[in-house]
Each structure stands twice: as structure tokens, then as C-alpha cells.
């Protein structure tokens, strides 16, 4: 069985605006225009494009898992309508204190995706706006990790623990990251 490379993407702060009080409804969703453009550039790559998102608002009782899935489905539909691509979505619905294996920085969401899609972590990328995204990628064995300065990224890059996670790349947003790594993406 052949394994596929993947581009793992966080949602909030990468594709849509982060909200201090969580994305609880469609009214809270604001998609970054540059993210739509970036996801359109990924249309023809051999990489799987997989969304991996912590949604602790579910575990905190602030929204239902059904609402979270509906929000994700609408985001994906808009991206597809703009000729972009997301192949699958994985959600951790747990609050931080639940101690689950799927909440980033744990690698559970990436491991679930790898099992379902036969992912080769050694040829994959993890892109997020938080150090926990990078930690999850590294814990799963993802070879390339990228921190975006959108969302919480700028503040995260300045944390002392960011030095312990090196090496990782930093880009202004998803579009600049995708443009920078495009030569790798077409090699598969």
C-alpha cells in the first residue's frame, strides 16, 4: 500500500479568524481571503489537505458538535466553490482538562487522519498559528512544521518555548506559506 503526503491545517487563525470567545455560530466565521487563494493553489497537488481543529467550545458546552460540523461543512463548501480543496476534517471536541489523546498538542487527530488516508508523516507538513499545532505535528512525526503569524501566531512565535520547537518555518499567512512550499508539493 502506498502512503500519501499530507498538508495538515489548523482552522482558527489559519483559514478563519480566531475569536476570543470561540467560533460558536456561522455569524462568528470570517474566512481569510488569502486562505481561499492558498487552498485553490493546492487543487492539483498530490498532497491530501486535511483540517485538524481543536474545538474546546464543544467540551465547554458552548456549542454542539453538530453545529461545529455544520460550520466546518460550510467553510469547506465555500472553499470548494472558490476552486480550493480540503479533503477531510477532524475535530477534537474536548475541553483542555479532559486529557484526551486528540487535543493538540497531542497527535491524535493527525494519527486518525493518517489511518483513514494512509499518510506518510515523513513527507507531510503541519501548518498552524499555535505552538500546540507544531507540537502535535512533531509528536506524530510530521517532517515539516510551519507557524503562521495570523491568528495567535505572532504572540506564539515570541513565547520562550518556541525556541525548543525549532526547527520550524514562519510565514505571514497561509498564502505565503503555500507559495513557499509549492515546489515540494508538486513532487509528492
Image: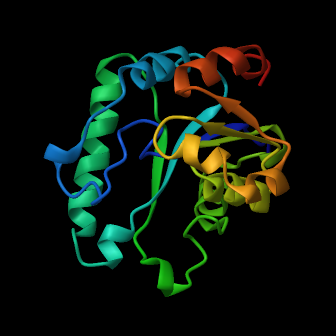
Residue at the spot x=25%, y=49% of the render? 71
Q: Is residue 129 visible?
A: no
Q: Position of residue 188 (x, y in %)?
A: 77, 25
Q: Position of residue 142 (x, y in %)?
A: 78, 48
Q: Toward which corner of the image does residue 36 lie, by quadrant?
A: top left
Residue at the spot x=69%, y=33% of the render? 170
Residue 99 falls left or right of residue 81: right
Q: Is residue 178 above or below residue 56?
A: above
Residue at the spot x=44%, y=25% of the render? 35
Q: Toward which corner of the image does residue 128 lie, by quadrant?
A: top right
Residue 1 falls left or right of residue 46: right
Q: Is residue 159 above or below residue 101?
A: above
Q: Is residue 78 visible?
A: yes
Q: Position of residue 28 (x, y in %)?
A: 20, 46
In front here: 140 or 20?
20
Residue 113 falls left or right of residue 59: right
Amino acid at each position: 500500500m502506498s502512503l500519501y503526503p499530507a498538508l495538515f491545517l489548523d482552522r482558527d487563525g489559519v483559514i478563519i479568524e480566531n475569536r476570543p470567545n470561540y467560533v460558536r455560530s456561522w455569524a462568528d466565521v470570517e474566512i481569510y481571503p488569502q486562505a481561499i487563494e492558498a487552498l485553490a493553489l493546492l487543487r492539483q497537488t498530490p498532497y491530501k489537505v486535511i483540517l485538524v481543529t481543536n474545538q474546546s467550545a464543544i467540551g465547554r458546552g458552548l456549542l454542539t458538535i453538530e453545529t461545529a460540523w455544520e460550520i466546518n461543512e460550510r467553510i469547506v463548501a465555500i472553499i470548494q466553490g472558490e476552486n480550493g480543496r480540503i479533503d477531510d476534517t477532524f475535530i477534537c471536541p474536548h475541553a483542555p482538562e479532559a486529557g484526551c489523546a486528540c487535543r493538540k498538542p497531542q497527535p491524535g487527530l493527525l494519527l486518525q487522519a493518517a489511518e483513514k488516508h494512509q499518510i506518510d508523516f515523513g513527507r507531510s507538513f503541519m501548518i498552524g498559528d499555535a505552538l500546540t499545532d507544531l507540537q502535535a505535528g512533531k509528536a506524530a512525526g510530521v517532517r515539516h512544521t510551519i507557524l503562521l503569524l495570523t491568528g495567535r501566531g505572532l504572540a506564539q512565535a515570541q513565547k520562550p518555548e518556541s525556541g525548543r520547537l525549532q526547527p520550524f518555518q514562519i510565514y505571514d499567512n497561509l498564502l505565503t506559506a503555500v507559495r513557499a512550499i509549492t515546489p515540494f508539493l508538486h513532487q509528492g
